[in-house]
Image (cartoon, rainbow, N blue to C red):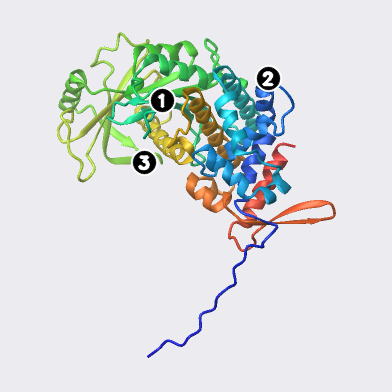
Amino acid sequence: MKNIATVSRVKVSADGHGVLSHAGVGMVREVADLTGLSAQVTGVLADTYRGPWSHAPGAVFADLVAAVADGADCVDIAAQASRSRSRSRSAVFGPAASTTTMWRLIDERIDAEHLSAIRTARAHARAAAWAAGAAPVTEWLCIDVDATITIDHSEGKENAAATWKRTFGMHPLMAYLDRPDIAGGEALAALLRPGNAGSNTTADHITVLHQALQYLPQDYQPAPGVGDGQKILVRSDSAGATHGFAAACRDAGVGFSFGFAVDHRVREAVEHLNATAGWMPAIDSDGEVREGAWMAEATDLVSLGSWPAGTRLLLRKERPHPGAQLRFTDSDGHRITGFITDTRRSVVPGGMAGLELRHRQHARVEDRIRQAKATGLRNLPCHHFDANAAWLEIICAATDLVAWTKLIGFADEPALARCEIETFRYRVLHVAARITRGARDIRLRIDSSWQRAQQIADAWCRIRCAFT
């Protein structure tokens, strides 16, 4: 029997006007202006122009940052995204620069000297954002240091090399400020390195540490030798557990918590703790006892004389997850891990278990890097090393703008503040809107059928009010 039901079809034409897609990106772009990032970058790059410019360099930089936050992973895509909605965009957010102008900004204008000044500009923007309500409300600031590999499929990029994972590309070292109240951190520092850079290079870790501390707002920087200064903890996996890095943390007035390799000394300590019942239960993030996990202090069982005074060694044993294979370093059917810290007893609630929980939360940096890979870090699009370093700084700025947008605009909306970047794009940045004009005003009318339209509009107003 034939189906004689008629199918309703809509007529499609290309004559729509006054409609803006990805309207939520304008909120991130506006944060770049409100924090002074655009103006600061314009001042930094003004000397790279011989005459007047058609587009202020800070505006071009902010457009690139907003496009990367929206998912662009190369300059061409960023420029095409701006050009594809140029008519509607220019009416609301100003005209966008051409692809050539964006490429020239990265390839020619941002060299090593100007890159350092742009980092200072980002620090000024961070101070403004924190003063507007994005400041962390916590006793300790935790800076997580970790490296990642960016795969390169072309041998033509400067300093691309074989990596320790038998891949080919770059090996940047990142430092994030942990912000557990949102799904993401703030990118304090990033050091682009060749692919063959070592995982535990002390000099690189010290460089990233100094940059991260230098670009914190003045009131949040550590004060070595002063007891009432800001408390800062630097966390790293075992790649950062070097004597030089620990000494640099001590000299800078910050604490450290580093992963510690399980060698024969640690295995002997574990056997001693097993024989003397020296283990105590570990805890979860909610403070409850974690089933199948224990911890103990092994400071007196392993010589730590070469580390800074007050260094402690804490060990953790846990039943492997179902399907996980045991390793040679495991003991009595349990997975053994360890870390060292210079935090004294009774400083962190929960005692040793609280210290272990605090160090275990360093794993959140993997989420930060994974989100950065979805925000331009998966691809370093330029041939020259300095240009790729500039692109990496753009990625860090995009990470910061998204974090500040969430912290100021969506503090009361955990479903939006705690969602990861892909979900945040779908729920907020990619919302459609209609542009209307009347009474000498331009209005951006967010699609009322979108379930989070009112939340987005409220967040936009909240951000503007925070900077007035």
Image quadrant containing the N terminus: bottom left
Front residue of 224/438: it is 438
Q: Does residue 160 sit above or below 371 in this rendering?
A: above
Task: Tell which circle, 3 or 2, labels the residue nearer the N-terminal end.
Answer: 2
User: Alpha carbon of mark 2 to alpha carbon of mark 1: how far?
Assistant: 39 Å
Image x and y of residue 409, in percent? 62, 44
- Residue picked out by circle 2: 47
Q: Residue at x 36, y 32 (%)?
A: 360
* For the residues bearing labels 3 and 1, Cβ distance under 8 angstroms: no
User: Alpha carbon of mark 3 to alpha carbon of mark 1: how far?
Assistant: 23 Å
Q: Residue furthest right?
A: 439
Please rate how many residues cluster around mark 1, counting C-alpha atoms within 10 Å: few if below 14, some from 14 to 19, many from 20: many
- Residue picked out by circle 1: 235
* For the residues bearing labels 2 and 1, Cβ distance under 8 angstroms: no
Task: Tell which circle, 3 or 1, labels the residue nearer the N-terminal end.
Answer: 1
Q: Which mark is residue 169?
A: none
Front residue of 429/384: it is 384
Q: Quadrant of residue 335?
A: top left
Q: Which mark is residue 288?
A: 3
Image x and y of residue 193, in percent? 41, 22
Image x and y of residue 10, in percent? 58, 73
- Evaluate whether residue 69 shows in this view: no
Q: Amino acid at mark 3?
A: Glu
Left/right of residue 374 with respect to residue 462 in the rendered view: left
- Evaluate whether residue 363 shows in this view: yes
